[in-house]
Image: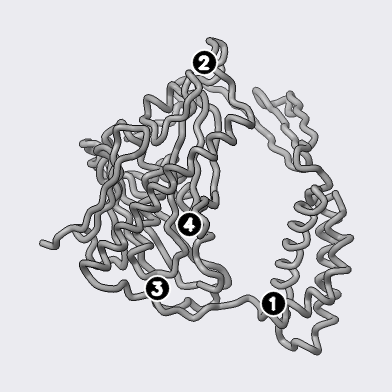
């Protein structure tokens, strides 16, 4: 049996410990790490193909979260006692993990890459979603797959007495007025670059507010973002300790060799920037989305014609370069002029409207519109016997 390599550290401000362990499970994987808080533990396995699949024009990263009934000491309740489809929580955890990880891979890296996170222990006290982000990052760090990590993540709960609780239990989260998940990586100057924020009130927020709990405003959220950096750094430091222990035990981690696939060359982008900038500047100032897209399409078509001789057979690359240039110009306008693409300022909201009773034959309907985005809700009622029957 292989000897495990394990590193642990206390989580500041709590009585909990964060642990990373490798070398015991999934020995065939390029990177495999178990992360643990309390008795909740997840196994993250990271793997990547050695080459690029034909026809791939994007980075094919797959994040999969597998929840298992045995993790909580239970047997699946279905007729055949088999695990069912991924739960809504598992799907949301996949997305939560993907968002901070994806930007950490280098430009041009197109090898098919996946990380599978299996919940192997659930103590029903500590959530596994934020733990999954840290585990996935750690597995990439020891895999040799090109990855600009480590990435650290933490959930903070804003308690009814106005304090932030790091890595809250389910109960602490339910009794909080607000929760925020923050992920980021450490910069050379020691600060943390925040790469993802997900936040929102809890189900009982308004009840707590009515009972006198302090309300959450921008200053409170800013303090939470600033406070999160402490725990993000702790996870990053522990992941680096794991990497150092792996190198000390097994020797250097062999990096995965890959050939960068670039959508366009620097020379082509410079040519597109020279030709298309004057055409795109007025286009991105059109507030109405359909008219703006039509103007950008026209600018793209003109650029294709202008550069057809200089870059023959590179229509796809020219289109990608125009797309990148458009993003660059929009960003410059937001930062330099304080104006977003639809003409709003940083603090301006889109017009919001709602209407009900639009379909007379339905039991209930509602149309919600924000700017140019619409949502139509239709309600149908029936007797209890029409309930969906689920074996679970």
Name the residue: 43% across, 28% down. Answer: 173
Q: At which x and y percent is residue 137? A: 40, 56
Q: At which x and y percent is residue 25? A: 21, 58
Mark 2 secondary-structure assignment: helix
Q: Is residue 79 visible?
A: no
Asked if disc 4 and disc 1 are in contact, CB closer than 8 Å, the reply is no
Q: Is residue 296 visible?
A: yes
Q: Residue 63 carries which label?
A: none
Q: How far apart are marks 2 and 4 (CA)?
A: 35 Å
Nearer to us: label 4 or label 1: 4
Q: Name the residue under label 2.
A: 208
Q: Name the residue under label 3.
A: 49
Mark 3 secondary-structure assignment: loop
Q: Name the residue under label 4.
A: 101
Name the residue: 36% across, 37% down. Answer: 12
Relative to 102, say whether 89 is above or below. above
Image quadrant holding the N terminus, namely: bottom left
Q: How far apart are marks 4 and 3 (CA)?
A: 18 Å
Q: Which of marks 2 and 4 is nearer the N terminus?
A: 4
Q: Which of marks 1 and 2 is nearer the N terminus?
A: 2
Nearer to us: label 4 or label 3: 4
Relative to 305, say whether 80 is above or below. above
Q: Earlier in the sequence, mark 4 or mark 1?
A: 4
Image quadrant holding the C terminus, namely: top left
Q: At which x and y percent is residue 154? A: 43, 42
Of residues 263 and 247, the one drawn nearer to the viewer in this rendering: 247
**Seen in the image, is 338 located left or right of residue 6?**
right
Of residues 198 and 117, the one drawn nearer to the viewer in this rendering: 198
Asked if disc 4 and disc 3 are in contact, CB closer than 8 Å, the reply is no
Relative to 313, say whether 110 is above or below. above
Q: Which of marks 2 and 3 is nearer the N terminus?
A: 3
């Amino acid at each position: 049996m292989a000897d495990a390599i394990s590193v642990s550290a206390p989580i500041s401000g709590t009585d909990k410990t964060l642990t990373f362990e490798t070398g015991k499970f999934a020995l065939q994987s390029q990177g495999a790490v178990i992360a643990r808080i309390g008795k909740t533990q997840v196994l993250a396995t990271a793997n990547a193909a050695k080459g690029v699949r034909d026809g791939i024009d994007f980075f094919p990263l797959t994040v999969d979260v597998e929840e298992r009934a045995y993790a909580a000491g239970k047997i699946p309740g279905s007729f055949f006692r088999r695990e069912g489809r991924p739960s809504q929580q598992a799907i949301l955890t996949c997305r939560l993990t993907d968002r901070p990880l994806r930007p950490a891979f280098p430009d041009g890296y197109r090898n098919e890459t996946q990380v599978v996170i299996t919940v192997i222990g659930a103590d029903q006290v500590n959530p596994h979603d934020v733990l999954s982000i840290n585990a996935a990052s750690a597995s990439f760090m020891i895999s040799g797959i090109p990855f600009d990590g480590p990435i650290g993540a933490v959930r903070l709960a804003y308690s009814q007495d106005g304090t932030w609780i790091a890595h809250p239990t389910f109960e602490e989260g339910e009794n909080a007025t607000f929760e925020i998940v923050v992920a980021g990586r450490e910069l050379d100057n020691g600060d943390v670059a925040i790469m993802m924020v997900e936040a929102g009130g809890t189900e009982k927020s308004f009840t707590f507010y009515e009972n006198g709990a302090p309300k959450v405003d921008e200053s409170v959220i800013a303090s939470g973002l600033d406070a999160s950096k402490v725990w993000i750094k702790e996870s990053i430091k522990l992941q680096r300790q794991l990497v150092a222990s792996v190198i000390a035990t097994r020797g250097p981690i062999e990096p995965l060799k890959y050939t960068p696939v670039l959508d366009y060359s620097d020379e082509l982008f410079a040519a597109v920037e020279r030709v298309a900038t004057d055409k795109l500047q007025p286009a991105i100032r059109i507030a109405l989305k359909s008219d703006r897209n039509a103007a950008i399409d026209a600018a793209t078509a003109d650029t294709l014609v202008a550069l057809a001789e200089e870059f023959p057979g590179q229509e796809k690359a020219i289109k990608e370069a125009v797309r990148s240039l458009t993003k660059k110009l929009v960003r410059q306008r937001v930062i330099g002029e304080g104006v977003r693409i639809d003409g709003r300022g940083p603090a301006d909201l889109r017009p919001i409207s709602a209407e009900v009773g639009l379909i007379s034959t339905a039991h209930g309907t509602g149309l919600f519109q924000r700017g140019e985005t619409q949502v139509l809700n239709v309600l149908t009622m029936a007797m209890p016997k029409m309930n969906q029957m689920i074996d679970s």
